[in-house]
Amino acid sequence: MADKELTIFLLDASVSSTAYKYVFDTLAAKLLKGLKTDYVTVAVFNSKDTVHAVAETGKFRGIEVLLEFETVSFQGLQKLHQRLNAAAIVNETPDPDCADVVQTVLFASTLFAPTKKKYRCSTDETCALFQVELYPAAKSDTSALDTHEYVVDANRDIVRLERRTSNFVWEKNFQGERGGEGQNENEPKSEVSERKFDKVAVELHSLTPAFKFSNYDLIALDDDLLQATKLPLFSGLDIFGFMPCAQIPYELLTGDAYYIVPEKLSSENNTLNFQAFVEALRTRKLAVLCRLVRKSEKEVEIGAAFPVKIHSHQKYTNCFVFIRLPFKEDEKIGRFPPLNDDDEESFETKADSEKSATLSLLMDDFVNGQLYDSDENPSDDEQKSESEIRNFKVTLKMSDNSKLPLPPKFHNRNRFLRSSPAINRTQAYMRKILLKSLSADNWVDFFESPDFIKDNLKGLERLTNFFNLQNCMAVNAEDDYSGWLVDLRKGSLGQSKRLATELGAEYVQKMEKKKTKTGRNGVNFYQRGNYGADEGTYDEIPDFDF
């Protein structure tokens, strides 16, 4: 029997319906796969209604379960679409209730501070320093109830689970010291090995750190050795890179949020320089990769600082919102994509770099000749500034249930779709048609509309028509309908020839492979291939009787 997979979505009913786009995209992808063992559960909190298995007990109010351990179906998607977009599920207040965050300074230092003690900022004329402070913006809920686990039995009784951790070591007993005397040959080896050792409980305070340099060799570390193995860390906030905000996936933003603002008692020159720096990054839509150490010998936090505009009392100001990025040890709470798609840097000569630049331009011309521009205008939501905050109640929560497929990105280099371009386009269009049909009142009119291709196939965001050298939509079609499709690729014929010439990608006919002949010499068979075919037969290998 195949293993069953259960994915749980916990949604906030107080946010806008556009925030559920990731859920619908993920469920649509699961529906297109057609897996019968892939179950989902969708629950909503901050709802006016309380609908779940233990609702009669009066516990867990405001939680409504929309789908409970069901396979993804079109009826289920339609039910979610109607319920999540209904006005009854949204609270009267547009913002959820949040606990007040105490505005205390968590860190005060110099932005762009040097990470090396030997470096002197005063001697560097190009050095830029800003006196900044770090304030909490939104913290994850650390309530004790969040760490509890419960079991609901058939009688609707709720039982709380308790987990305890114990440490132990294996010690040989008298059977292990005898060396296996009196051992039964029919007894499994695993049971025999376990019988030779006993579990001995060990208190946590009796343990000491150790360095393991092989499977059997350990060196205990005292305080002096432990201090020598650590790198010296001092508090500081440093910038080591910039990155477009659009290239940082939202799945990486699982940590607490903090504001980086100019120091209150700093000079006016420091404040103006900081504001100009943030404004320049916000205009170019760049995020800052920072290294933060709050106190000496404490954790090193690597995060992204996003430039934002704060609207307060009919005035605007600029600051950073810093969010810690997950490290390798944080993979247990989610599956995170890499920050860049580029391979390792390669060292090229000047001639190779110039040739690479020429080929890149030719490849761009070739690709642009195969595509056409969308005639749709960006929506009002896209035209609005994404870096402007009008609400201080930032609700960033720590998520322990983030092992979900990443949201699909509709472009040709999407690593989460199939490698075939034709299948990529087909799945992308099918997903769009599926999600768009949820809002249709009459399915027959929706699919039989004369503008069906124009509305669903031509106007897809960041996507163009089906890509194929012969254009799959023009195959076996009448000339009246396929003429404009064939014209799309006529402009790329010249670029493709130039590109093939520059790359040296000429067609070379494969040589015909000669058929090997099998001969027989007494009892042994031997083959005569192309190599050494004219040298005759070889002597047989004598038997040395080893």
Image (tube, rainbow, N blue to C red):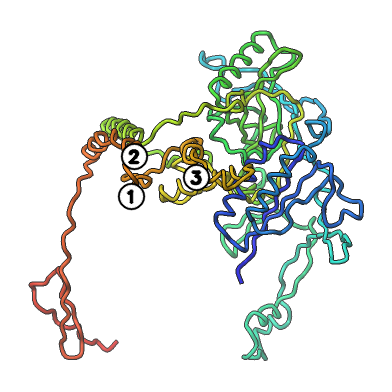
Q: What number of labels is visible?
A: 3
Q: Nearer the viewer, residue 433 or 34?
A: 433
Q: Are marks 1 and 3 in contact (CB under 8 Å)?
A: no
Q: Secondary structure at mark 2?
A: helix
Inter-mark Cα distance, 2 to 3:
23 Å
Q: Nearer the viewer, residue 512 or 352?
A: 512
The residue that disc 2 covers is: 480
The numbered mark at residue 429 is 3
Q: Callout 1 environment at 10 Å: few (<14), some (14 to 19), or many (20+)?
A: few
- Please report the residue visible at 68 percent of the width from the left and 44 percent of the height from the top: 81
Secondary structure state at the residue bearing disc 1: loop
Q: Position of residue 178 (x, y in %)?
A: 68, 84
In the rendered structure, which disc, 2 or 3, sits on the residue that comes first in sequence?
Answer: 3
**Which quadrant of the structure image shows residue 321?**
top right
Tag 3: residue type?
Tyr
Horizontal side of 454 relative to 531 (left or right) equals right
Label 3: element kind = helix
Q: Residues within 10 Å of mark 3 (few under 14, many from 20)?
A: some
Give x and y (percent) for residue 519. 15, 82
Residue in the picture at 85% in, 48% down: 50
- Distance (Cα) linking label 1 and label 2: 12 Å
Could one spot residue 222 in this view of the protein? yes
Disc 1 from disc 3: Cα separation: 21 Å
- The amino acid on which the numbered mark 2 sits, given as a three-letter code, is Asp
Q: Amino acid at mark 1?
A: Asn
**On-image quarter of the C terminus:** bottom left
Q: Nearer the viewer, mark 2 or mark 3?
A: 2
Q: What residue is rendered at 23% in x and 35% in y?
A: 498
**Is residue 244 positioned above or below 126 on the image?**
below
Q: Which mark is residue 151?
A: none
* Residue corresponding to mark 1: 476
Q: Say which label, 1 or 3, has the lower sequence index.
A: 3
